[in-house]
Image: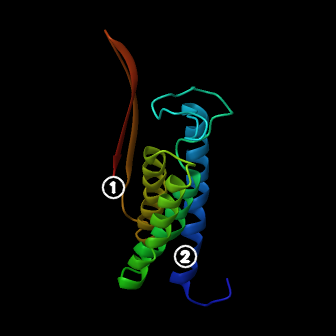
Amino acid sequence: MLTDNDKFQDAAFTSLQSVLYTYISVNILKYTFARERPLQNSSPYVFNFFDTNATSFPSGHASNAFAVIVPWVVYYPGIYTYSMLALPVGTAIARISKGKHWMSDVYAGALIGAFWGYRLSKRHLDPTRSENIAITPFYGRNGGGVSLKVSF
């Protein structure tokens, strides 16, 4: 807000918006999947669905780190912004090495944060661009589910 550079302000706003969307997405998934952290459980394959005490999957730290940095990379592509990706990658590695998350926790978190950062940046940079998101429920002989299709 202290600069007259509209692109810089928009990148900062997009980064903040990306963190907000990421935070909401990650916390819904944490509650839904409810996987315990490596220090609580010896297996990454155990999920306690809809349990508020198990919050490992996906990694909130990794997702937010990617959500903050990816918009800057999209707005200002170049060697300096690409090198900034070392921060979220380092965050993800640290979460695993400290025993706070399983590898799949940080992968999922990184994908969620990068997704929102990239998608919102592209939408802000080109508002005339069409986006298609389709959520389609289906039911068959063997059960049902929901299909999600995202087109950029």
Characterize the local packing of mark 2: few (<14), some (14-19) or many (20 or more) Cα atoms within 10 angstroms.
some
Q: Residue at x 58, y 80 (%)?
A: 9
Label 2 to label 1: alpha-carbon separation: 20 Å
The reply to whether dot 2 and dot 1 touch (C-beta < 8 Å) is no
Q: Position of residue 99 (x, y in %)?
A: 55, 49
Residue 16, by quadrant, is bottom right
- The residue type indicated by label 1 comes to Phe
Between 114 and 97, the one lying in front of the other is 97
- The residue type indicated by label 2 comes to Asp
Q: Position of residue 100 (x, y in %)?
A: 58, 49
Q: Is residue 17 visible?
A: yes
Label 1: which residue?
152
Check disc 2 and report its element: helix, strand or loop.
Answer: helix
Quadrant assignment for the N terminus: bottom right
Check disc 1 and report its element: helix, strand or loop.
Answer: loop
- Would residue 80 appear left or right of 12 to someone viewing this image? left
Q: Position of residue 12 (x, y in %)?
A: 58, 75
Characterize the local packing of mark 1: few (<14), some (14-19) or many (20 or more) Cα atoms within 10 angstroms.
few
Q: Residue at x 61, y 43 (%)?
A: 27
Task: Please say which color scheme the image uses.
Answer: rainbow
Residue 104 against residue 6 in the figure, above or below = above
Q: Is residue 63 visible?
A: no
Q: Residue at x 47, y 35 (%)?
A: 44
Between 104 and 119, the one lying in front of the other is 104
Q: Of marks 2 and 1, which one's residue comes earlier in the chain? A: 2
Quadrant assignment for the C terminus: bottom left
Q: Residue furthest bottom?
A: 4
Residue 30 against residue 131 in the figure, above or below = above
- Would residue 56 appear left or right of 82 to someone viewing this image? right
Label 2: which residue?
10
Q: Position of residue 33 (x, y in %)?
A: 54, 32
